[in-house]
Amino acid sequence: MRTISQVAELTGISIRTLQYYDEIGLLKPNERTQSGYRLYGEDALQKLQQILFFKELGFQLKEIKEILDKPDFDRIEAFKKQKELLLLKRNRIDRLIQLLSRLEKGEQCMDFKEFELSEYIEALENFKTNSARDVLKHWGSIENFNLFIQKIRENESDLAKLAIQQFGSIEKYTEAMKYNLDHFSEIMEQQMSQIPEEMAQQDMLYQQLAADMTKDIVSEEIQHIVHEILLFAQRHVTSDKLVGENYCKIIIDTYSNDYLKTIYDTKHGAGSSDYLVKAFQYYLEHHYVK
């Protein structure tokens, strides 16, 4: 057992911080002496290590507590996910350092790919903070959503190119994505409120789309199915803002999400979500030209 002073010396964390972690129930000591002094065992130190990794990744203390308090929390699995997130973060920082090194040498590097989607990423961070219930409900955990954001950061350059192809500019893409986030509950409630028969009809259309992924997404057959899905939405979605081009963009954004992609691929086959996204992207580019 270690005293709170010894833990503070070992970890570099202040005694007051450790006391605060105890007060909020994030990290309790294993026991207390008769005089009331906190004592920490190896399991408490392991938990503290886990907390520090989550903090390094930008998690709030409340979020960390929710994760660690889950009955099915797996410490080793959490380490694996933390490693993945840190690698993504490191790769982006490495690219920024490389850019700064070139600028330091006097090179003229008009390269803004690391910053292009910053406004969209900021909107996602705000959504995470202000709509935690929606995040937990539809992504499963704050951790999953953070992984989603990190992967967007990692692929900023490719996503920026895609955004320009689909929407004409980063600004229009960001505006559309902000609309989706601002109306996220409305969109999801609309989808979930469909009666079973309608759900079955919609599911059948998605099954048809993914039935044979060897077919070219530009083929008349595949594009006709996409058109039928959009017509179905037009008949059953009440808000005019959620149909047509907007609905097409929502579908693309939804099935580009790693968490939802996994669910769709499990249901319709590996690669089906990417196939669906490409089919809708083609439809968007050829039927909603500005």
Image (cartoon, helix red, strand yellow):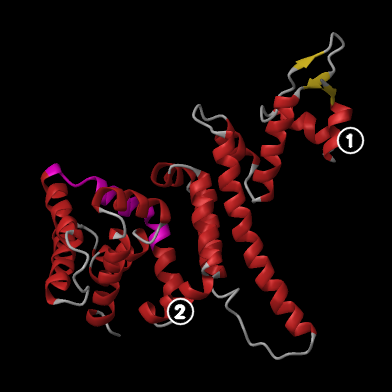
Residue for point 66% across, 27% down: 25
Side of 238 relative to 124 (left or right)? left
Give the mark nearest the N terminus, 2 or 1. Answer: 1
Q: Residue 31: give its label.
A: none
Q: Residue 9: give its label.
A: 1
Q: How many numbered discs, if any?
A: 2
Q: Main secondary structure of the magenta part?
A: helix
Res 17 → quadrant = top right
Residue for point 26% across, 48% down: 267
SS of the residue under disc 1: helix
In this picture, is 251 found above or below 146?
A: below
- Can the viewer see residue 241 in this picture? no
Q: Closest to the observer: 240 or 86?
A: 86
Side of 241 relative to 115 (left or right)? left
Three-letter amino acid code at disc 1?
Glu
> In the image, is residue 195 part of the stretch drawn in magenta?
yes
Q: Residue furthest top?
A: 34
Place of residue 35 in the rendered image (x, y in percent of width and height, measured from the top left): 87, 11
Q: Residue furthest front?
A: 214
Place of residue 280 in the rendered image (x, y in percent of width and height, measured from the top left): 26, 70
- Would you name the residue on which mark 2 appears? 161
Residue for point 32% across, 64% down: 274
Place of residue 101 in the rendered image (x, y in percent of width and height, measured from the top left): 76, 79
SS of the residue under disc 2: helix
Separation of disc 2 and disc 1 at Cα? 49 Å
Residue for point 19% across, 57% down: 206
- Can the viewer see residue 169 in this picture? yes
In this picture, is 278 found above or below 88?
A: below
Q: Closest to the observer: 112 or 94?
A: 94
Range of magenta residues: 180-196
In this picture, is 88 found above or below 99?
A: above
Identify the image quadrant of the N terminus: top right
